[in-house]
Structure formats: C-alpha cells, structure tokens
Image: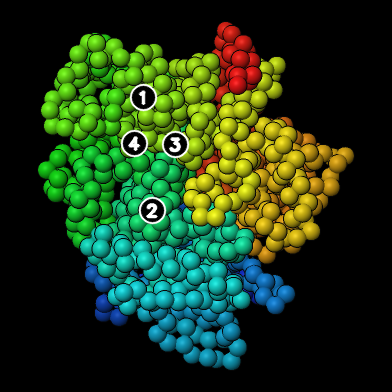
Amino acid sequence: MDHKMMYEQLKGQVKLPNFAIPKRYDLKLKPDLSACTFAGSVEINLDIVQETQFLVLNALELVINEVYFRDSHQREYRPSDVTVDNEDEILVLAFADVLPLGEGILGVNFSGILNDHLIGFYRSTFVVGGEKKNMAVTQFEAADARRCFPCWDEPALKATFKITMEVPSEFTALSNMPVIDEKLNGHLKTVSFDETPTMSTYLVAFVVGLFDYVEDITSDGIKVRAYCPVGESEKGKLALDIAVRVLDLYKKFFSMPYTLPKLDMVAIPDFCFGAMENYGLITFRENELLHDELQSAAVNKQRLAIVVAHEVAHQWFGNLVTMEWWTHLWLNEGFATWVSYLATDCLYPEWKIWNQFLQLTVGGLQLDALEESHPIEVEVLHARSINEVADAISYKKGSAVVRMLQDYLGDDIFQRSLAAYIKKYAWKNAKTEDLWDVLSEVSGIQVRKLMDTWTKQMGYPVLYVKSKNQIIEFEQSQFLSSGSHGQKDWIVPVTLCIGSYKRRKNLLIETKSGNLDISSLCCSSDGSARTYELNQEKWDDEQLWVKLNVGQTGFYRVKYDDVLAARLMKAIEANLLSSTDRFGILDDSYALFEASDLSLSSLLSMMNVYRKEIDYVALSRLIDISYNIVKISSEAIPYSLNELKQFFKNLLSANKLGWETISGESHLNVLLRGELLTALVVFGHSATQKEALRRFHIFLGDRNTPLLPADLRRVAYVAVMQIVSAKSRTGFESLLNVYREADAVQEKARVLRSLASCPDSDIVLEVLNFLLSDEVRDQDIIYGLSGISSEGREIAWRWLKDNWDLIADRWGSGGLLTQFIREIVTPFCSWEKADEIEAFFATRVTHGIARTLKQSIEQVRIKARLVQNVQHEQSVDKLIRQLAFKE
C-alpha cells in the first residue's frame, strides 16, 4: 500500500490500527524547568502481529528527532517517512521494507514544550522562600500521554514502563514506582525508577518539584506518603491517615492487597481536575489534599475524605482492572465513587454519608433527564470527546445504579462478586458485560438482562402510581425535563412501604404497567409474623401512606396520584418518614414541576409541610429548590418575588440553629448552619445580613476571631457582596484583600466563590476580568464562575463572547472550558437567549464542548417553558401571599 492511501485510511479513525502491540516502554526524560521544554527518548518493545510497512502510534505536539526499528535479529530499519498528524493525534512511520512478524524495538527521540494548559507534561508554579519557581507535572487521562512521549495511548494496550529522569539536583522526582537509583552529575541528577507492572498509558505519571512530606506504613508494609508544599507537611496528615486506613479497608473488601510497594499523594498548585488516580502516584489539587485546622471548613474535610477514598479505590477499580475502552469509563468512575462513600461511611459513620449520597444522585438524575443526555455506556468517537463523558452520568448516575444493584442483590453477594471480578481481571481490561457475568454467576440472577436497561440506554423512568381499593397501579414512562415522554422501558427494582417501615415489599417491575395487590402483607405494623389484612376501611384511613423507592436507593422518580400525595404530605408533617424519603419526595416534586407535571402551587404547598424540617440533606435540597424557584419566578411573576422570598425566609428561619457553634454538635449541623445562613442572606433576611456584616468587620481586624470560623465565612462574604455596588465598593475591596493575603487555598476558593454573587452587573464584570488576571490560577477560575448572580447573567454572557478566543485558547485543551459554558449559559431562561447562544457557537463548537453546549441550551429552553407555565398558572400569586404571611 502506498503512503498516500495509508494516510487516507488513517484519517478520522477512533482507534489505532493493530499492526503492533506494545509490551514495554523504556522512557527517558529531561525537563528544562527554566526554558519550559523537555527532551526524551523511548524504546518500545513491540510484538509485530501483522506484516506491515507502517507503524502508527499516538503523538501530539511533539517534535520527532530520530526514529529506528530493530527486529529480533538486531537488523535496523529506518523510516522513509515520518509524519506527525496533530489533527488525528498520530505519528505515522512508513518503512521501505516490510517489518518482520515477532518481537522488535521501536526507538524514538523527541522533544516538546512544558505547556500551560494543565494537560500532558505541563508546567506548574510554586513559591518557596518568596521566590517563584517552576515544577513539571503530568496529567495523562484521558488521552494526553501522547503529548509527553510517542505511545499506543489506548487503555487496552497495557505495557510495563521503565522510567528514568534527569532533573535539577535539589528537586524531588516522583513516578509510579519507587526510586531504585540516583546519580548526581553537577547541578543535575539522574533518577531511575523501578519498572511498573502492566498498566495503561493514561496512568503513567511523574512530578518534579520541591516538597516536604509526611509518611506512614500500612499493616502490610506499604509505604504511604503525602507530599505537600515546603513547610506545610502538617497539612498532609489527615489525607495520609485516611489513605492508610482505606488501603487496609479495600484490601479486605476486594480480597486483594494493594499491588505496588508504595503510594504517594502529591499536592499540585495548578491542576485541572480534583485529583488523578495515577498508579502509585495520585496527584491532587492542593485544596483536595491539604487540611488546615483553622482554614478548612467541615465541608472541606468531608470532600477531602471522599476524594482520597475515591482515588485510592481506583488503584483496584481502574488501575488493576481497567476498562477496555472509554465507552466503559463508568466502570472506573461509577464504582470508585460508590466505594468511596462506602469507605467514608466506615471511617466517619457520624457523617451519615449515604444520606448525603442522595445529593450526588440528584446530579445524575438532572443530567439524565435531558434529551441531550447519553447512556452510561456511550460510544466515544474522538479523543477530545472523552472528557465530556467523564460527567455526571459516568460518576453520579454510574454510582447510583451501582448502589441500586447492591441494594437489590444484597451486600454480601455484591461484595463477593466484586472480589471475584477483581481476581478474574487483575492486570487486564474488562467491559461492562464482564462485570455483569461475574455478578450473575455469584448471585444466580440474570444481572445483565436487568442492568442493560440502565447502562445501554439513556434516561430513567418515572413511575406513575395510583390507588384503587387495595390495588396499587403502576405505569412507567421515560422521565424528561422537557415534558416529553420517551418510549423506553426499564426493569426496575422497586421497594415500597405502606403506613410503616415494617410493612415493606420488594418487587421487580419488568413491564410498562402493572398492578400490585396489597390487601395482604407479610407482617403487621408491630413487626409480628401474622398476616396484616388491609381491608377497605383501613385503606381509606388518611394516615395510611404509601412510599415507593424506600431510602431513595433506586434511580427513578415517582408521581403519586392526588390521594397518595396528600397522605404523604400528612406523613411528613407528622414526622413519620425517614429523612431520605422526605428528601426524595421533595426532589421528585421539584423535578415533576420542572417537567410541567406538577404546578408551582402544588410544589409550594408541598414545600410548606417542611416547616419543621431539621435534617441536613432534606433542608439542603429545600434550599437549592428555593433558589431555583426564585430564579424562575423573577422572570415569570416578578410582582410576587418579594412575597415568595418572604415565604422562603419563614420556611428556613423556622430552624433555630443560629450562628453559634455548640460544643460536640454533629458534623451535619455544622454543614447545615452555613447553607442555611447563606440562603437567608441571599433571600434578604435583614437580621442575618446585619449579623453577617458585623462579624465580617470584626474578622477584618482579627483573622482568627472565633466569631467567624471557616464554616461561616462564606455567609459573611456573600452578605458583603449583596450590598456592594459600583458606587459603594468598600466591601469588595476588603474581600479582595482577604483573597490576596490568604495563604490557605481553601480560603482563596471561598472568596472566589462569593465575589460574583453581587447584584451590581458592573462589579460582576470587574470580578470576571479579575478571574482572567495573573492573581487567579487558571485552575481556580471555576470557583469564581460558580456563583454569578442573576443580575450578572447578561454581562457575564457578553464577557464570554468578548473573550471567547482568549478563553478557548487558554482553557480549550483540558476539561475546564465546559465549565465556562455550564456556569454562564445555563442560568438563562428565554427562548430568544437559547437561539442567540446557539447562533454564537455555530462556528465555534469543538469536539470537547459539543455535548455540554447542547445540554446547556436544552436547559435554557426547559426553563423558558417553565417561565411560560408559571405565567399562565391561575391563582399562584394568591397562594404565595398566603404562604408569605402564614404564621
């Protein structure tokens, strides 16, 4: 085949051709931290499996200096043509002669740039002794090892890696494996690392920088270290303790020990994601690894525990057993997310983390209710599309359906199945079907038949539930926030209780509709074994509530008929339902409202029965829903907005948690206090605003005042920004000073999250421009984008358009660009704005943002329809007035 024909065949291909299979990489790298460049060489042991004149591997933005191939007889072949195709991200080597079958070595000398885009082999900066220095870091997932060295950059093409680095002698060099040799050569040193076990390219990692560390050893001798900024090693102790404990926990849970001799965790100053599970060398954003007793809020500590547990879980689910292709990314992320909550619950049972898991599930339910969603198993057609599928479907829906399956099969069967799966596929690659087959074998249940409906098709069902005599009627339909109804069906594991948690039934709904006779249940309300007869008189009792999806372990929504809905409202008022079920009823009600299946009046009436709510997860959801309703109502019924806010203030101020922390109070109360007070500030509760400002002014004079601990600072910062304007900037300037003077990354993030909440659009524009300045690290811009006020929406959109070329160039290569679209596009709620956004991006869309853009525009149109519905709703203003002034 001639060269031109081969190049044509390779254009646009998703995967590399299978002419050769890599077995081992001998990689040598020399980063120049001053010039921000690197040089390297790699010798790749190959198995040529097809006679070919071509070798095709991945490379991107590399300069190829020399190439050779040596066969098993030591004959050397030089390519007649070397082509780096940056569009298809491949290196094509054409040889004059056919390469012989069997083993050989491909050698490549290359060079590249330590980029500023937080991907591949990139530059980060840190300050030590007042001097700014460069460090070198890797971020290879999903498909960016190719930016560092030529390789077969696909997860199924596993190999071993022998890594050697030449670095400044005073710097620390880290990689996946321990150092086995270090040789000084003047101001440089050569560091050789032990060879890795078989692993995928995206898990290869190295870091070159200056650090201090703390270390510990697990019960079976694994050395664990947390590498921190110089002088801050104490901040690594919490993460270290958690990592050591979860390593022991996972060893028992998976019936498989951790497979490397060491595990390093490193805090990176500039990092695109939260953390990355590189085998034996986990990299983190600083605020996900470092814990400061004074500056870290309870929410930071909880997040740290979950993130560390998640990344350590990947050492089994993802690193030891790796997905065969990115279609099965959820096998990595869904399971690591689920097991990280399991581990956190073992370490901190008082956090009731499985209740909080519901907040995560909501993110999956919301995204999967879009017509522009995608199945858990999604076809990936371009390397730059991979980051877009590492979304709430892979992580949140993925982990939620895992939990649903665990609940259905039982804890013991599920754990034994996972252990068997890890053992069977250790060091290999697996597909979703492989896991289902192991689960089926252990459980005796046809798991694949059940779960294919959840992973191979997008979306999920809403169950419409009606009561007729002693019969419960079910009908399932695809739930879509657009109000449409799809034709898909699911096999749904359903749980329900009737009047008591002791009267429970589990069933599997496998058809579009069906009936359940509940006239006879297995036990009575007192738990005795006698049959409980549900006669018509008892069924007509208004106290006899029916609740489906007990504990919210199922990934579906429920719409009750009016009779059953009214009984549930009474049950909530009487405090007869668990906090998770109260959460579920509230969340389903809001989703049904969004889908035009429930009126605003009905939703507000439902919210009104939560006046006595004290549970964190239920109240947190109540707060989020209140925010959303205010945004919709400000467009639909602006004349009722003040009364609506008054209703929400009444609803939330009924909780008497107050400002003062109480010695020994629960972790959940600490979380709730901050969210509750922030909501009251945003809704204009004058006493809360006044107290927040008073405490802020004391804080400015004493940054360690107990009046404003880390858990309450965001309340004060948001309160300050509520009264800032272009003519009254004092509070804004004070907050900027807090940001500039803060050493702790958690404090900087807190300030950034608050700045754009200002109702003055001129200030919002100033904040957005500040985010582009050198004062804000590229990774941290997402914090500032997440809190833009409704009043600032239009100016933020104009700013995005004006700066798009700069933003796309600076953030377009990694995963952060989608955040700009989500945070700035999604808040709008008019048809005209959706059309305008679509037109602007028509010539600017790329593989990396296409799906996010479609989803965001769909959400704008959903809200536009919602605004229209509320405008046409009869008497809603009258109900709001009644609720606002109800005692």
- Measured as percent of width and height from the top left, residue 842 is found at 59, 32
Type of amino acid at the residue the image marks with label 1: Val
Which residue in the rendered view is the most extreme toward the top? 874
Q: Which residue is mark 1?
A: 558
Question: Secondary structure beneath disc 1?
Answer: strand
Within 10 Å of disc 1 (Cα), the crowding (few <14, some 14-19, many 20+) is many
Question: Secondary structure beneath disc 4?
Answer: helix
Q: Is residue 21 visible?
A: no
Q: Which residue is mark 2?
A: 349
**CA distance for labels 1 and 4:** 13 Å
Badges 3 and 4: C-beta atoms under 8 Å apart? Answer: no
First reached walking from the N terminus: tag 1 or tag 4:
4
Q: Which mark, by number, is residue 362?
A: 3
Residue at the location (43% across, 68% down)?
A: 241
Badges 1 and 2: C-beta atoms under 8 Å apart? Answer: no
Question: From the viewer's perspective, is the residue at label 2 or at label 4 nearer?
Answer: 2
Type of amino acid at the residue the image marks with label 3: Val
Left or right: 677 in relation to 552: right
Type of amino acid at the residue the image marks with label 4: Gly
Q: Where is 699 relative to 509, above or below?
A: below
Q: Where is 65 relative to 619, above or below?
A: below
First reached walking from the N terminus: tag 2 or tag 4:
2
